[in-house]
Image (tube, helix red, strand yellow):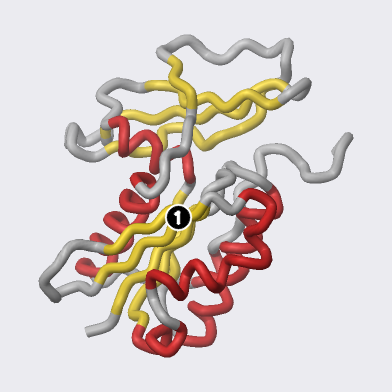
Amino acid sequence: MGAVLALHSSSDVLGVGVAWPGMAGPAELGAFPLGRGLANQLLACIEQQLPADQWPQLDRLAVAIGPGGFTSTRLTVVLARTLAQQLDVPLDGVGSFLLVARRLAIQQPTWLVQELARRGVVAGLYGPAPRGDRAAVVELAAPRLFAPDTPLPPGPQLAAVTQLPADVGQLLELSLQAHAQGLAAPWQSVLPLYPTSPVAGI
């Protein structure tokens, strides 16, 4: 049975998670504070968790699609899409705010907010699954940009602060659940989430 690999680079820290379904032992989670060095060190950090000669054994991949840094998020999404295409395996794309909400185990509809200098805030709404499963946290409204003069809708607010390796652990858990259920996840549909344009003024 193959491995599941999860990648998270929506902050200045790269998170890498690896699990081998059906095999004893916990998942392997790593956090690498790379900052702007991500482009040069991405592959080497992944190989610390899963050597390249084992990549053909991957059965599924997962990647955090943002919101996050434009360059860092794009790099891991492109890599994950390439691996999924070449290996012909499913790729789960999951929002980084949802991973924060799951880690916080939010129990009522709550806005997760990330401030942007001079541009306002990016905010998304998260809460328990509508069917009443309080163990499941879902995205009720996707993250979008609120301009500085635009108030958020009413409701509790929390800062959307990424924590690694905990959040890549959440990502890996979601992908393992999808793997166990045999859910389809075509790589073509996984794209970075940019609530703001990387080009000023657009």
Of residue 29 and residue 159, the one placed in the foreground of this image is: 29
Q: Amino acid at mark 1?
A: Gly
Give the percent coordinates (x, y) of residue 144.
Answer: 61, 32
Quadrant of the rendered image containing residue 163: top left
| Front position in the image: 38 or 195 | 38
Instruction: Name the outermost residue toward the right.
Output: 201
Tell me the crowding category of disc 1: few under 14, some 14 to 19, or many 20 or more residues within 10 angstroms, Cα based.
Answer: many
Q: Could you tell me residue 108's position as x and y percent? A: 29, 21
Residue plotted at (53% across, 24% down): 113
Position of the C terminus, as image quadrant, is top right
**202 on left or right of 146:** right
Compared with residue 165, is residue 138 higher up or lower down, i.e. above or below?
above
Q: Is residue 42 left or right of residue 183?
A: right
What residue is at 40 percent from the left and 37 percent from the top? 100
The residue under the point 45% across, 55% down is 15
Is 125 placed above or below 33 here? above
Q: Position of residue 81 (x, y in %)?
A: 55, 72
Residue where numbered disc 1 is placed: 15
Q: Is residue 117 above or below residue 150?
A: below
- Residue 66 in view: no
Task: Indicate the quadrant containing the N terminus: top left, top right, bottom left or bottom right.
Answer: bottom left
Point out residue 127 in the picture as x, y percentages from the top left corner: 33, 29
The quadrant in which residue 39 appears is bottom right
Front in this rendered view, residue 49 or 102: 49
Q: Specify whether residue 44 is in view.
A: yes
Q: Residue furthest left?
A: 24
Q: Note whether 170 is above or below 52 in the view shown.
A: above
Residue located 35% across and 86% down the image: 57
